[in-house]
């Protein structure tokens, strides 16, 4: 039996603009995770996926050819040079809420690649895991930047620019994040598509917005490296305002962001695609529980506190 895990993620700076080539910063969230357990099955049975949280149990070769779970299994086998699938079961569990900006799809795919390849005797490097997961992200997201698969496969804070090698960076000091869930499902694919349509209608306006967000991400990296958390927080606030201008926030996200700031957060913003899903607040350890309480009172359906450290 082989078990592998993958964390969730939050984007600290640069969502959406990252799809258009601007830099972004994301960090892994270890308080939630996806797990894949691979076990040998009776010969001749092929590969069965048991997705407990989704209530799905199916043979991989009987699933539709564009099923993301089928695809990641097949891509992994192809990478390992295995032509006839061995008899296996792959049991999946995840504590990462789906369609809430925490990278649930990329984490499930990552856990599958890791568990399956290790079970078959190969340990793939994070870069290869990330590349395989990216192929499946295209089904979940349409035109993904690749940031989710990268941060989750590397399990490290990343400064990410689409199509370029991953950049990790040093952190002046570790910090704490409080992540609040609006309880609203918001598929990334839909929001990314809406932003694309808006960009096509008014390229000049959106390009300027993306440039401003890219600049905030660059300054955010500098502030994180210098350990200047006050500045990181202010930049997160600025990033949220730009996302509001972009039209990807919603009343529930704005309320949680405001509640976190009032309770003493150094800064707060929506995280991920927006229009629902999660927001993230940067806090000093001593204000974490006040911010958590304020978020719950403001209607958050779940609140998570996580520490971010360098690799
Ligand atoms: C999703 O986590 C982040 C987006 O920027 C989409 C992407 O980068 O693929 C909204």
Image: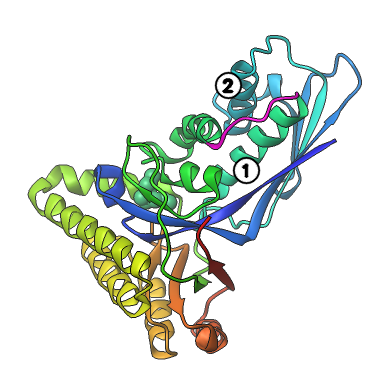
Question: Could you tell me how far apart the alpha carbons at marks 2 and 1 are, in whole angstroms?
Answer: 18 Å
Which residues fall within the magenta stretch? 121-126
**Quarter placement of the N terminus:** top right
Residue 135's label in the rendered image is none
Of residues 75 and 286, the one drawn nearer to the viewer in this rendering? 286
**Tag 2, which secondary structure?**
loop
Which residue occupies 41% across, 40% down?
A: 146
The answer to whether mark 2 and mark 1 are in CB contact below 8 A is no
Report which quarter residue 13 is drawn in: bottom left
**Residue at image coords 48%, 39%:** 140
127 w.r.t. 178: above or below = above
Above or below — where is 201 with respect to 296?
A: above
Colour approach in the figure: rainbow
Residue that appears at 17% across and 59% down: 212
Is residue 297 visible in the rendered structure shown here? Answer: no
Residue lying at 23% horizontally and 65% vertically, measured from the top left:
242
Residue 223 part of the magenta segment: no
Q: Is residue 211 above or below residue 237?
A: above
Tell me if the residue at label 1 has its CB under 8 Å from ligand 1: no
Disc 1 secondary structure class: helix
- Checking the image for residue 108, the label placed there is 1
Percent from the top left, x then y, of residue 165? 37, 37
Image-based side of 7 in relation to 130, left or right: right
Q: Name the residue under label 2.
A: 65
Q: Is residue 150 left or right of residue 216?
A: right
Crowding around mark 1 (Cα neighbors within 10 Å: few <14, some 14 to 19, many 20+) is many
Chief secondary structure of the magenta portion: loop
Res. 218 image quadrant: bottom left
Q: Residues within 10 Å of mark 2 (few under 14, many from 20)?
A: few
- Assess mark 2: CB under 8 A from ligand 1? no
């Amino acid at each position: 039996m082989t078990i592998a895990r993958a964390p969730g993620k939050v984007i600290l700076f640069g969502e959406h603009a990252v799809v258009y080539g601007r830099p972004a910063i994301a960090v892994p969230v270890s308080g939630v995770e996806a797990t894949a357990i691979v076990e040998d099955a009776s010969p001749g049975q092929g590969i069965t996926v048991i997705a407990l949280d989704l209530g799905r149990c199916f043979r991989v070769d009987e699933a539709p050819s564009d099923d993301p779970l089928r695809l990641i299994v097949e891509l992994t086998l192809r990478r390992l040079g295995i032509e006839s699938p061995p008899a296996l079961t792959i049991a999946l569990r995840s504590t990462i809420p789906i369609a809430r900006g925490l990278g649930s799809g990329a984490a499930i795919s990552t856990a599958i690649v890791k568990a399956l390849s290790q079970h078959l005797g190969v340990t793939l490097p994070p870069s290869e895991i990330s590349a395989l997961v990216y192929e499946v992200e295209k089904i979940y997201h349409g035109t993904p930047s690749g940031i989710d698969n990268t941060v989750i496969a590397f399990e490290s804070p990343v400064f990410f620019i689409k199509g370029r090698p991953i950049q990790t960076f040093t952190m002046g000091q570790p910090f704490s994040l409080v992540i609040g869930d609006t309880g609203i499902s918001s598929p990334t694919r839909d929001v990314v598509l809406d932003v694309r349509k808006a960009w096509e209608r008014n390229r000049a306006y959106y390009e300027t917005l993306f440039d401003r967000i890219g600049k905030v991400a660059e300054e955010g990296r500098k502030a994180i490296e210098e350990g200047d958390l006050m500045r990181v927080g202010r930049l997160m606030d600025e990033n949220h305002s730009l996302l509001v201008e972009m039209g990807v926030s919603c009343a529930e996200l704005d309320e949680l962001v405001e509640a976190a700031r009032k309770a003493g957060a150094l800064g707060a913003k929506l995280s991920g695609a927006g229009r629902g899903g999660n927001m993230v607040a940067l806090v000093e350890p001593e204000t974490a529980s006040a911010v958590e309480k304020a978020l719950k009172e403001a209607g958050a359906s779940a609140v998570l506190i996580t520490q971010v450290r360098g690799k």
